[in-house]
Image (tube, grey):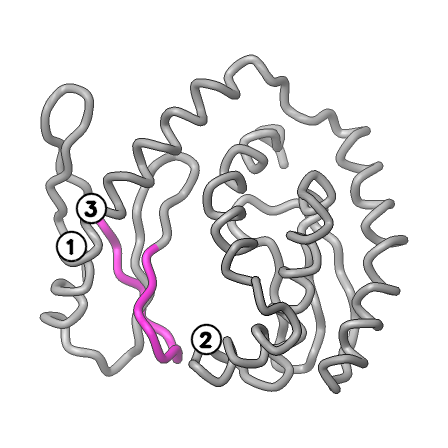
């Protein structure tokens, strides 16, 4: 399923082709990538009309976010991408620094976890598999420590709720009452950090 979305740009209007990816999730979400493309993730059984209505209701947010990403891209145009050596150094630091903090928060939340993997990705800050294996983006080390803690807690809370339901966010809020600030920070500043990845990254 693809939604054609007409949005304003600097020269008038443009038509976006927005793919819809269905999966075993409970809520609809919209993702805007650093290249300004838009995609939608939705539960398998939800009617197409409901998805289209949700996307239309979020059109002002889509427009605002794409404009901000475009502005950020301009302001970051003079910042060089990270070198392979810098990426290796970030990865090594993350492998050293993250496990103790993950263990600390896991004890606080009351969950266990499996293998910890550090990568440099363009679409994810972290993930948690059904087996409890954790993956984190080394670019998190370019963010404030508060943001790193949010991503760690977010993934560990998936050990209790493998979804983004109300129960899941309640678990996150129990540990980090101001998690919404960190989530907003990542949405606003994360794409700029991702642009520092080299093309081969």
User: Mark 3: which secondary structure?
Assistant: helix
User: Mark 1: which secondary structure?
Assistant: strand
Q: In front: 171, or 21? A: 171
Q: Which residue is mark 3?
A: 60
Which residue does the image show at 75% across and 29% down from the upper left?
84
Circle 1: is it few (<14), some (14-19), or many (20+) Cα within 10 Å? Answer: some
Q: Which of the two labelled residues, at mark 3 and mark 2, occupies the earlier sequence position?
A: 3
Mark pair 1, 3: CA separation:
16 Å
Q: Position of residue 136 (x, y in %)?
A: 69, 57
Which residue does the image show at 83% across and 72% down from the upper left?
104
Q: Which residue is mark 1?
A: 3
Identify the disc placed on residue 44.
none
Q: Position of residue 195 (x, y in %)?
A: 54, 31
Which residue does the image show at 69% across and 64% down from the upper left?
152
Q: Which residue is mark 2?
A: 164
Residue span colored magenta: 17-30
Tell me, yes or no, whether the highlighted magenta stretch contains residue 46: no
Q: Which of the two labelled residues, at mark 1 and mark 2, occupies the earlier sequence position?
A: 1
Residue furthest front as drawn: 177
């Amino acid at each position: 399923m693809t939604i054609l979305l007409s949005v304003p740009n600097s020269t008038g209007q443009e038509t976006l082709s927005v793919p819809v990816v269905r999966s075993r999730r409970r809520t609809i979400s919209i993702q805007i990538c650093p290249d300004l493309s838009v995609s939608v993730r939705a539960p398998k059984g939800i009617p197409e009309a409901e998805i289209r209505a949700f996307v239309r209701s979020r059109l002002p947010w889509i427009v605002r976010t794409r404009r901000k990403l475009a502005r950020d891209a301009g302001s970051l145009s003079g910042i060089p991408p990270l070198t392979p050596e810098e990426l290796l150094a970030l990865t090594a630091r993350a492998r050293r620094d993250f496990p103790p903090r993950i263990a600390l928060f896991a004890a606080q939340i009351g969950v266990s976890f499996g293998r910890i993997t550090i990568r440099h990705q363009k679409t994810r800050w972290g993930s948690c598999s059904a087996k409890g294996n954790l993956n984190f983006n080394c670019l998190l080390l370019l963010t404030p420590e508060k943001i790193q803690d949010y991503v760690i807690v977010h993934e560990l809370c998936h050990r209790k709720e493998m979804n983004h339901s109300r129960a899941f966010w309640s678990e996150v809020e129990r540990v980090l009452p101001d998690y919404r600030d960190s989530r907003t920070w990542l949405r606003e500043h994360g794409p700029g950090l991702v642009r520092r990845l080299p093309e081969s990254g």
